[in-house]
Image (cartoon, rainbow, N blue to C red):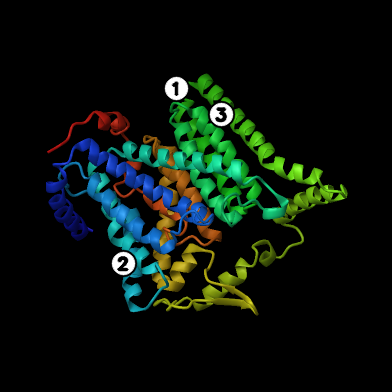
Amino acid sequence: MNLLQNIYILVFNTVFKLTKHINYTIREWIAKLCVFGLSSLFFVLMILTRQGITDIHVKGCTEGGIFLLILLCIFSVNKPLKKVKWNKWITYPYFTAAVYMTIMSFDQNPGEFYQSYAIMMLLILPALYFIWGNRKDYLTYYDWFAKSLIILGLLSAVATIMFAPFSEKNVGLRYIGLTDNPNILGMISISVTAASLYMIFLKRPFYVVYSILTGVYATFIWLTMSRAAIAVLVIQLLAWLIIFVRTYFPKEKIRSMAFVALTMVIMIASAFLTNIVLQKNIVAEAKTEIVMSETYQIADSEVDAVKNRFDFSNKSLEEFTSGRTDIWKWYIDKISWRGHDCTNHEVEIAPGVIYHNAHNTVLEISYRFGWPAGAAYAFFMIVMVVALIIGGLICANRKYTIFIILLTIAYFIEAMFDVMTIPFERGPVLMFYMALIGVFEGDFLAKKDKNEESLTQARGRHEIS
């Protein structure tokens, strides 16, 4: 890791000799736009491309995303870089997985975009963490990041409500909005709720808007019937409430209780109204039916579908997991230390039933790159959970920690049950890696709150030459 930091210092300090002559405000705006661009990739891929508005697919997102990450690194440098002490509990398993994945990706083809993912983990993302570890004004970055997701969330919510009302004729019983898959809409939604809850937690101006947005996306999540997304939303709300109480109640109990109550009322009212607006189209359709009994059949089938999807009783584990356990068994049986060539990777669970992914990130990494990579990544995930619990509840000195927690919840839960590996193919993956600013250095675990006012300081800071 010292070698890697030395390389970063050499490369980015050399580049900074040129970029420092660009006006500081312009450099900051370029970095902001890079964050916005990275945040928007999943929205473009899963909404605009699916609607035929753009023709950007995973390859384009990967190439564009890597370019934006490098550009963000370059324009995030605001002073000569020095070595940073990284948290060994987090960085050791992370780099073990990244190094092994990169080496194995040159041994045989782990699948399209998987080699670029490994190299990005090893070289590009740590550069971003290192640069911001030098800056230390983490609140500035998280402010850019959260606002980017909220802007995208607002635009998507308005477009979805206007152009994709719930309709039995075109989406069935699971809502897809402007996407082509209910689980994808769920993934988009849990990223927006993470950003909205974070801004509410900071008690920023327009928190009413953020509360409304949370309610809108809570409705989207519920209508998708995506069990993973619903679980994420519930845990996000619980985490937000627990950390809010831990942070604010000791100083201002009455005002904090009133704030929480008002926020919840706004969220619930927003969710209720959003559901009415979305369902309005299906009601209108139902009124035009000649045989009114069909209306009741639609309503009954919707209720039955919800009950059936969340009913544990009278179902085998395979049925409840939608066949995932069969997929997991197939992968577990074939995991090796070396990984596999996945040039034309297909998993035939039954005649005509073919899958291309494990629907579990740890198994996916273990199968494609080898079990040492999967084991190291699993250990990294466990350490992250423990560290975030400590940072959110025991230390609780960095308010930005809750944003990392909310995005980690979104990624980790989805990673256990869905296709959640390639960063530029699945939004929660990229959002998680983008949220690791401040984690490598261990700032979010610091006992003293040195950087809490850094956002204000950064806005008034002059260019450092």
Q: Can you give x and y, in whole percent of width and height, for residue 372 in the image?
A: 39, 70
Q: Are marks 2 and 3 in contact (CB under 8 Å)?
A: no
Residue 38 placed where, x, y %?
A: 38, 50
Do callouts 1 and 3 mark residues in contact (Cβ within 8 Å)?
no
Q: Nearer the viewer, residue 406 or 161?
A: 161
| Residue 3 picture location, percent across and down | 19, 60
Asked whether the viewer can see residue 123, the reply is yes
Compared with residue 22, is residue 359 higher up or lower down, i.e. above or below? Answer: below
Q: Amino acid at mark 2?
A: Val
Q: Is residue 99 left or right of residue 184?
A: left
Q: Are marks 1 and 2 in contact (CB under 8 Å)?
A: no
Decide which of tag 2 and tag 3 comes sooner along the chain.
2
Identified at 66% across, 35% down, the residue is 272
- Mark 1–mark 3 distance (CA, rounded to whole Å): 19 Å
The local secondary structure at tag 3 comes to helix
Q: Tell me the residue that label 2 is attached to.
A: 99
Name the residue type under label 1. Lys
In the rendered view of the protein, which quadrant contains the N terminus?
bottom left
> SS of the residue at dot 2?
helix
Q: Is residue 207 above or below residue 362?
A: above
Q: Residues within 10 Å of mark 3 (few under 14, many from 20)?
A: many
The picture quadrant where one finds residue 204 is top left
Q: Amino acid at mark 3?
A: Thr
Q: Earlier in the sequence, mark 1 or mark 3?
A: 1
Q: Is residue 369 above or below residue 82?
A: below
Q: Which residue is mark 1?
A: 251
Q: In the rendering, which numbered label is found on residue 263?
A: 3
How dense is the environment of label 2, judged by Cα within 10 Å: few (below 14), some, or many (20 and up)?
Answer: some
Residue drawn where x is 49% and y is 26% of the image: 249
Q: Gap between marks 1 and 2, in whole Å? A: 46 Å
